[in-house]
Image (cartoon, helix red, strand yellow):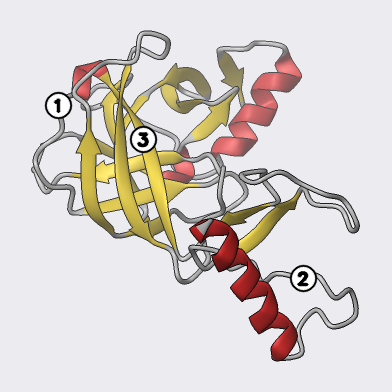
Amino acid sequence: MQAAEARLAQREETLRTGGGAASGNSLVLRSPISGRVADVFAALGASYDEGAQLFRIVRTDRVELQAQVPASDAPLPASISEIALEIPGRADPVVVKADHMHDAGVIDPATRALPVQFDVDNRSGQLLIGQTATAILYTGEREKMLTVPKEAVLTEAGSPYVFVQTGGERFARRYIEIATREGDLVGVRSGITPGERVVTRGAYDVQLASAASGLPAEGHVH
């Protein structure tokens, strides 16, 4: 009875203020959050039972970022100083600030990775709901490693690689494991060794020469 009286009072207030006068039977629906209308399930003139889903509202000013951290890198330190997202189609990573980090401490049996959630301020609208990217998590820890210019790194089927000079005008493709990125430098965890000569200019030209010669791993440039 109390719920019915509340609905009746809401209807009468709507009519009294001029709302819904055309149909004579309208109620004001207020979303519990501010956001964008992502889906509309309601149809004009249809009837619905209480609890039916009419709209889907998505909050975009603050989003949850879920990162799949490899088991070898888990658990993470207590604080992540910064997150950079490499989004396909964008030349430079998008840097975001995370206010809160949470993980359940359980490895996902399907991905064999640790799901970690971050709350991210997205008032600038640079991140989209459902978007996928490669996340680089900065822990503040320092590690000595090899670095190469980002122009030296090429990608094939999602796997990064560089060209190493093996002698004269001969080059070999080396797949690498990227540890971190900072500015114009890429930190390499494995794939090359100190003292090897990596192609830093014209790496794409070497790739074209390699493809033209039909050799997937090596190229000979004239």
Say which residue label 3 marks.
67
Q: Secondary structure at mark 1?
A: loop
In front of the other: 27 or 55: 27
Q: Secondary structure at mark 2?
A: loop
Say which residue label 1 marks.
75
Say which residue label 2 marks.
26
Location of residue 5 in the rendering, given as x and y in whole percent from the top left corner: 57, 65
Label 3 vs label 1: CA separation? 13 Å
Q: Which amino acid lies under the numbered mark 1 shown in the image of this protein? A: Pro
**Lower position in the chain sequence, tag 1 or tag 2:** 2
Label 3 vs label 2: CA separation? 44 Å
Location of residue 34 in the rendering, given as x and y in whole percent from the top left corner: 52, 68
Residue at x-position 61% and y-position 44%:
51
Q: Which amino acid lies under the numbered mark 2 shown in the image of this protein? A: Ser
Decide: marks 1, 2 in contact (CB < 8 A)? Answer: no
**Lower position in the chain sequence, tag 3 or tag 1:** 3
Q: Can residue 65 be seen in the rendering of this structure?
A: yes
Residue at x-position 8% and y-position 43%:
141
138 sits to left or right of 216 = left
Residue at x-position 69% and y-position 29%:
208
Q: Secondary structure at mark 3?
A: strand
Location of residue 123 in the rendering, given as x and y in whole percent from the top left corner: 45, 70
In front of the other: 61 or 83: 61
Q: Quadrant of the C terminus?
A: top right
Q: Up-down: is 172 above or below 37? A: above
188 sits to left or right of 4 = left
25 sits to left or right of 185 = right
